[in-house]
């Protein structure tokens, strides 16, 4: 075993997942999938995704640079985010990226002026706040009315007028992203209804968007990752095929992050102590929330198994990290095969928002990553 804690990625599962995505959109030539880099920007992962032919969705200048370095073509890069700095906008203009997903008129004005200075045209889409409840964690819902993201419906007419009048802006379309870890299809249905209505309204005024970007958010099975390792991409894209009303020539974009990479990654950690309390037993492991923050931050659940003892009797444990915060708990009262000091535990479904969110809190080292074919 390598020095724990570390991330282990199953590249063959990643490849099979990418294949499933491609098969699910194969019949819709106007569907284009961009990978949301923020879910996992490990260069080995980016390389696989680039080779599969997806585009990317970036939320920082550094992600734009990492994507270019990984081989993604500039014309497959979208750049979202409420707080793009001048430096980041200039970098994206210099690279000639495909599209800025613009989140306010204030940002639009800055992009116009920076593009004018470079004598360039910035292609943009407006991120619209469709007021759809994604029924997910409050920390990862983004589509509701009072939210820092996107432009509210009442302000959209004015924003579009402004963009159409700008010399260095080309308006491509509209963009949505309603939240993350969405496991029911119903919020996506609602999104289709809203997007179709907006599209129809502007078509009537003679404005034909070339791009309708539906964002990401498709969830994965954290409860049974081994039984259900690949999300139902077909069911997801079918919703849009059925319910999103487009006219010929309109391209539909998707920005999937978690659903592509979550299941191919695990965090491997070693048990330092099994501590007997008065009622509980604690498996104290050498990974902490600095390595994987989702349980502490979102109350997220990750399946955990003891990979050193795979078929003994089961006992109840709290699996906790070494960090000096009471939130440093991976899970409580879970059943593991009998666990001893030195055993290795696998924390599953950690490929998305895992390694990318790691920190050095408590002066801990950043986790390393290893890959299996
Ligand atoms: C985070 C994000 C995504 C990806 O979300 P997932 O839930 O990981 O699919 C897509 N688009 C935008 C704008 C985002 O911020």
Image (spheres, rainbow, N blue to C red):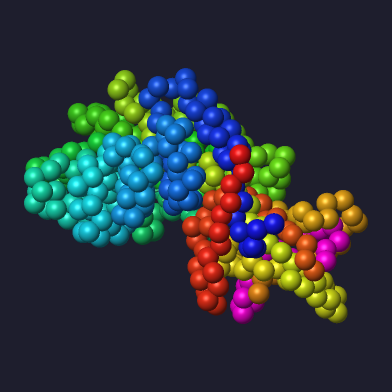
Q: Quadrant of residue 342?
A: bottom right
Res 217 seen here: no
How many numbered marks appear? 0
Location of residue 75 in the rendering, given as x and y in whole percent from the top left corner: 28, 36
Whether residue 273 is visible here, answered yes or no, is yes
* Residue 6, above or below 171: below
- Quadrant where the N terminus sits is bottom right
Provide residue 112's location: percent of width, then percent of height: 14, 50
Relative to residue 335, is residue 350 drawn left or right? left
Based on the picture, tell me whether residue 18 belongs to the magenta stretch: no
Q: Is residue 121 above or below residue 323?
A: above
Closest to the observer: 1 or 313?
1
Q: Looking at the picture, how far across and down is residue 166, in whole percent?
A: 11, 44
Q: Look at the image and tell me in which quarter the C terminus lies.
A: top right
**Left or right position of 274 against 113:** right
Q: Please determine whether, in this image, residue 79 is positioned above or below residue 208.
A: below
In the drawing, does residue 322 fall left or right of residue 309?
left
Magenta segment:
323-340
């Amino acid at each position: 075993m390598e020095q724990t804690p570390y991330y282990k990625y199953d590249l063959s599962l990643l490849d099979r997942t990418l294949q499933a995505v491609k098969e699910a959109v194969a019949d819709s030539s106007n569907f284009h999938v961009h990978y949301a880099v923020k879910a996992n920007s490990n260069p080995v992962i980016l390389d696989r995704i680039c080779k599969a032919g997806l585009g990317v969705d970036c939320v920082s200048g550094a992600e734009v640079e990492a994507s270019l370095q990984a081989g993604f073509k500039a014309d497959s890069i979208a750049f979202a985010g409420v707080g793009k700095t001048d430096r980041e906008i200039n970098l994206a203009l210099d690279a000639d990226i495909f599209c800025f997903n613009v989140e306010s008129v204030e940002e639009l004005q800055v992009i116009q002026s920076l593009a004018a200075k470079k004598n360039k045209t910035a292609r943009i889409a407006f991120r619209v706040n469709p007021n759809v409840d994604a029924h997910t964690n409050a920390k990862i819902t983004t589509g509701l009315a009072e939210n820092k993201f996107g432009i509210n419906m009442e302000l959209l007419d004015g924003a579009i007028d402004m963009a159409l009048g700008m010399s260095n802006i080309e308006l491509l379309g509209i963009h949505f992203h309603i939240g993350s870890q969405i496991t029911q299809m119903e919020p996506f249905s609602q999104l289709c209804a809203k997007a179709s209505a907006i599209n129809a309204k502007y078509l009537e005024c003679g404005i034909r968007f070339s791009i309708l970007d539906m964002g990401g958010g498709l969830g994965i099975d954290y409860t049974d990752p081994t039984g259900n390792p690949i999300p139902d991409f077909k069911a997801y894209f079918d919703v849009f095929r059925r319910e999103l009303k487009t006219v010929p020539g309109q391209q539909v974009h998707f920005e999937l992050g978690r659903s592509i990479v979550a299941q191919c990654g695990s965090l491997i950690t070693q048990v330092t102590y099994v501590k007997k309390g008065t009622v509980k037993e604690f498996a104290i492991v050498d990974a902490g929330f600095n390595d994987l923050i989702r349980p502490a931050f979102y109350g997220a659940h990750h399946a955990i198994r003891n990979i050193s003892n795979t078929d003994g009797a089961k006992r109840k444990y709290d699996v906790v990290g070494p960090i000096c915060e009471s939130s440093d708990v991976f899970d409580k009262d879970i059943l593991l095969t009998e666990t001893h000091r030195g055993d290795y535990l696998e924390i599953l479904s950690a490929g998305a928002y895992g390694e990318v969110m790691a920190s050095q809190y408590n002066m801990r080292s950043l986790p390393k990553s290893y890959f299996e074919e």
